[in-house]
């Protein structure tokens, strides 16, 4: 797939709401039947945890030079729920990931 509208975020830094870089975008997860990006995948930077995490596309703002996630502070990223597979997400995992970012918008 190619990005036909907007900016391709792969390689961009991920900024938390406190403007600290918490990682870099590694990929985008596409809903194949719908041809829509559903998640942005990013690798956590050292000091904020380890491994890859997903953020729902609606919770990420893709700018020219970074991807802003305004619902979480940098200290919250180490607890973002992980998923079991590198290629698919279950409904339960979707609920956990979405709820974590949504809860961060209210409580972080």
Image: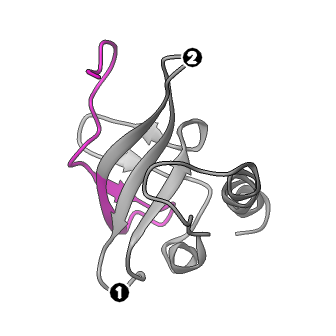
Q: Give the range drawn in magenta.
A: 1-25
Q: Nearer the viewer, residue 80 or 108?
A: 80
Apparent side of residue 95 relative to residue 5 in the rendered image (left or right): right
Picture quadrant where residue 100 is located: bottom right
Q: Nearer the viewer, residue 14 or 94?
A: 94
Apparent side of residue 107 relative to residue 69 in the rendered image (left or right): right
How far from the left and from the top, in percent, is residue 15? 39, 58
Asked whether the residues under the numbered discs 2 and 1 touch, taking CB atoms below 8 Å apart as contact, a structural biologist would say: no
Apparent side of residue 21 relative to residue 74 in the rendered image (left or right): left
- Of mark 2 and mark 1, the one earlier in the sequence is 2
Q: In which quarter of the image is the N terminus?
A: top left
When the figure is inspected, residue 62 is found, relative to residue 89, above or below; the finding is above
Q: Residue at x 73, y 61 (%)?
A: 96
Q: Residue at x 56, y 64 (%)?
A: 83
How far apart in space, not on screen, are marks 2 and 1 (Cα)? Answer: 36 Å
Label annotation for residue 87: none
How far from the left and from the top, in percent, is residue 32? 50, 24
Label annotation for residue 34: 2
Apparent side of residue 31 relative to residue 11 in the rendered image (left or right): right
Of all residues shown, which one is farthest toward the top?
4
Queried whether the magenta region covers residue 82, the answer comes back as no
When the figure is inspected, residue 105 is found, relative to residue 73, above or below; the finding is above
């Amino acid at each position: 797939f190619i990005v036909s509208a907007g900016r391709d975020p792969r390689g961009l830094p991920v900024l938390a709401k406190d403007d600290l870089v918490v990682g870099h975008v590694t990929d985008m997860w596409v809903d194949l039947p719908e041809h829509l990006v559903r998640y942005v995948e990013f690798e956590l930077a050292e000091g904020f945890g380890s491994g890859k995490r997903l953020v729902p596309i609606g919770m990420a703002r893709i700018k020219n030079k970074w991807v802003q996630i305004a619902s979480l502070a940098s200290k919250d990223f180490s607890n973002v729920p992980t998923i079991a597979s590198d290629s698919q997400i279950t409904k339960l995992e979707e609920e956990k990931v979405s709820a974590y970012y949504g809860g961060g918008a209210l409580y972080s």
